[in-house]
Amino acid sequence: GTFTIGAGGAYADLPAAMAALVASGVNGPVTFDLLPGTYANQRIALTPIAGASATNRVTIRSQSGNAAEVTLQFTPATPGQGPVELLGVSYVTVSGLTIDLAPLGGESAVILAGPGTGNRIQNCSIVVQGQSAAGIAVTGGQDDLELSGNTVSSGGDLYLSSGAYTNVRILAN
């Protein structure tokens, strides 16, 4: 199904929606549409999702598809946190968001820690303020990973660390 996140949506904020997703899992494709606005100190932090597969994909996106209309604005409470963390997750798409990180030191705006399969980061505007952290950090291996149509401002662009990587596509970033 499709669920909205934000004032007046099915979920008031990202933490509530992400907690429900991880706790319940999925039994079909699920889309979370973020209503226009700034989501201050909220983040997409996911661990493995029961039932997620190539046919039961989880998509988290701006409702309009326009990254300028939805901003995740995040300053970590502890070092190492990022506004988007996919930790051992498969078949998740994050699309059409502005992801704005004010790092403590060394954090990345988007963290994909493997193993993972079929993940997508698409059409996002990624901003790392004032530090040379990576915009997107991928560790531990990924299969069928696609990074496409993203822009990264400040900081580093992409960091790939050790792990098994197969069928990785980096397109028009």
Image (cartoon, rainbow, N blue to C red):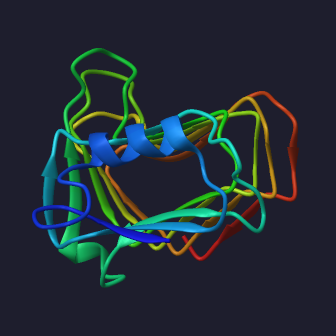
Does residue 84 appear left or right of residue 119 in this picture? Answer: left
Residue 109 seen in render: no
Q: How many marks?
A: 0
Quarter the C terminus occupies: bottom right
User: Residue 14: image x %, image y %?
Assistant: 28, 48
- At 23% from the left edge and 42% from the top edge, which residue is drawn? 42
Give residue 142's quadrant in the image.
top right
User: In front: 84, or 171?
Assistant: 84
Residue lying farthest to the top in this orientation: 78
Q: Residue at x 37, y 67 (%)?
A: 3
On the picture, is 99 further left or further right than 108?
left
Would residue 57 be found to the left or right of residue 135 on screen? right
Which residue is more in the foreground, 130 or 15? 15
Q: Where residue 20 sits: x, y (%)? A: 41, 42
Relative height, residue 14 to residue 19 (above, below): below
Q: Quadrant of residue 74?
A: top left
Q: Is residue 101 above or below residue 47?
A: below
Front-most of 63 and 49? 49
Is any part of residue 105 visible from this angle? yes
Could you tell me residue 92's position as x and y percent? 60, 56
Seen at 77% across and 27% down, the residue is: 162
Please tell me which residue is depicted at 29% across the width and 40% down the height of the picture: 15
* Residue 137 in the figure: left or right of residue 98: right
Viewer-closest of 86 and 33: 33
Q: Give how far across and how far down residue 58 sits, in percent.
A: 57, 60
